[in-house]
Image (tube, rainbow, N blue to C red):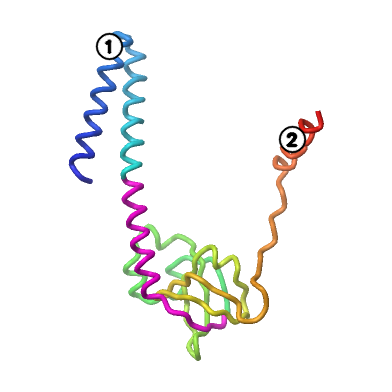
Amino acid sequence: MKKWIWILAVAIFCLISFAIIHFFGTKPFLIFAGIIVAILAIAVIVLYVLGRKAEKKQAEQQKQMDAVSQTVSMYIIDMKMMKLRDAGLPKQVLESTPKYARGFKMPIVKGKVGVKPMNFICDDKVFKTLLPKQEVKAKISGIYITEARRVRGPVYVPPKKKEGFFTRLKGQLKGDKEEA
């Protein structure tokens, strides 16, 4: 991280600490609580700056993916949530992913492009709208499916999940309040 962020964080910490001591005196509990508040304020500032950087980086990567994406016609053979190391992806993909991410379950689609069956990593939103044994026009960037449209028939919309007990209870309570 850049030096100015750390300098800003330390300056804010010092200012808040001095202000707390000035206003509350030398009571140990209040000084301790003030220092905790100062640390939390610094953490929020640092997370905000890091979030902005990550957002810019993600937007740049999305532009690159859109630039190299191509539309292909594919037949979906199978779809599963599986770990990367079990998905049968190329060795280069496994080597380029961080070690902690290799154990995560990801949406994997086995599709037939032309005559060659291949494994693809799919976007979560797209994965929910696909069904096995269907033909789709997919927009892919490398081995990542970013969009998909069914060739024949309407787009699959997954059924809504059943409401839980507490959700129904909240709805009943709101109904009682509206009647009163």
> Under tag 2, what secondary structure?
helix
> Under tag 1, what secondary structure?
helix
Please indicate whether residue 58 sits to the left or right of residue 114 in the image: left
Quadrant for the C terminus, please: top right
Residue type beneath disc 1 = His
Taking the spot 70% from the left edge, 42% from the top edge, the residue there is 167
Give residue 81's position: percent from left, percent from top: 54, 66
Kindly report the distance in space between the C-alpha atoms of the residues bearing marks 2 and 1: 48 Å
Please indicate whether residue 134 sits to the left or right of residue 120 in the image: right
The quadrant holding residue 70 is: bottom left
Decide: is 74 above or below 81.
Answer: below
How crowded pointer 1 is (Cα within 10 Å; few <14, some 14-19, many 20+) is rated as few
Residue 63 is inside the magenta segment:
yes
How crowded pointer 2 is (Cα within 10 Å; few <14, some 14-19, many 20+) is rated as few
Of 175 and 85, nearer the camera is: 175
Check disc 2 and report the residue beneath it. 174
Give residue 105's position: percent from left, percent from top: 49, 62
Label 2 vs 1, first from the N-terminus: 1
Decide: is 99 above or below 139.
Answer: above
Residue 69 is inside the magenta segment:
yes
Residue type beneath disc 2 = Lys
Check disc 1 and report the residue beneath it. 22
